[in-house]
Amino acid sequence: MEQKTQETRSDSPGRTPAGIGSQRTEPAGTGPQRGETSGMEAGQEAEALRAIREYEARVGIRTVAAEPGYAEAVMECKPSMFNPAGTVHGGWLFTLADSTGGIAANAYGQMVVTLDSSFHFLRTAQNCQMIHAYATEIKHGRRAMVFSVSVRDEKGTELAVGIFTYMPFDTSLMEDRKDRRK
């Protein structure tokens, strides 16, 4: 069976591949392809996108780039994000990484939830004004999508890396969510 290999993106300024999942290999023609969507109705898709943007604004994440299988996002480091040691609390780095992977997965036109993650802190986030995250797809399956995410400071220093697994879910759940907010 013919194999296809896709390299991760490394054309972002200051970006080098995280080394985790730098290639993915799968039989040609299997699984969802880039650009395919979940078949969401226009109203559901608009509601899903609104909910995502609302969440991003609430936690201070700004999407820089998003396409199926790849995303970049940034978060401004506010005084409330620093722990008593004077570094950005690791929970903020994780939140940015998880959200950036979710943005890349959602770019296929379907809502996802995080199934699993493995996250490694490499350096402390000291004297940071902004933190950046880059998500690159490792695998896109019908039931799960796996992404490698690199978190960096504004100088390009890698602070953390992670592998995140997402599962698409039925957007009718969004209707339940709207009903609960009333």
Image (spheres, rainbow, N blue to C red):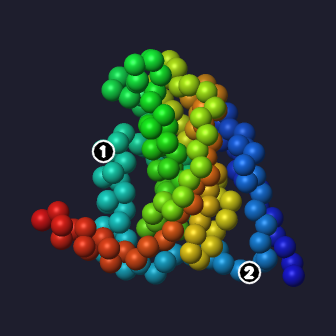
Alpha carbon distance from label 2 to label 1: 39 Å
How many neighbours does mark 2 have within 10 angstroms: few (below 14), some (14-19), or many (20 or more)? few
The x and y percentages for residue 177 are: 25, 67
The x and y percentages for residue 26 are: 77, 72
Residue sitting at x 37%, y 80%: 41
Residue sitting at x 41%, y 24%: 83
- Label 2 close to label 1 by CB (< 8 Å): no
Q: Quadrant of residue 2?
A: bottom right
Which residue is tagged 2?
Answer: 29
Where disc 1 sits, the SS reads helix
Residue sitting at x 38%, y 29%: 81
The x and y percentages for residue 64 are: 50, 45
Q: Is any part of residue 50 visible from this angle?
A: yes
Where disc 2 sits, the SS reads loop
Q: What kind of residue is marked 2?
A: Gly
Which residue is tagged 1?
Answer: 58
Q: Quadrant of residue 59?
A: top left
Q: Is any part of residue 64 visible from this angle?
A: no
Q: What kind of residue is marked 1?
A: Arg
Quadrant where the C terminus is found in the figure:
bottom left
Q: Earlier in the sequence, mark 2 or mark 1?
A: 2
Residue sitting at x 63%, y 32%: 122
Quadrant where the N terminus is found in the figure:
bottom right
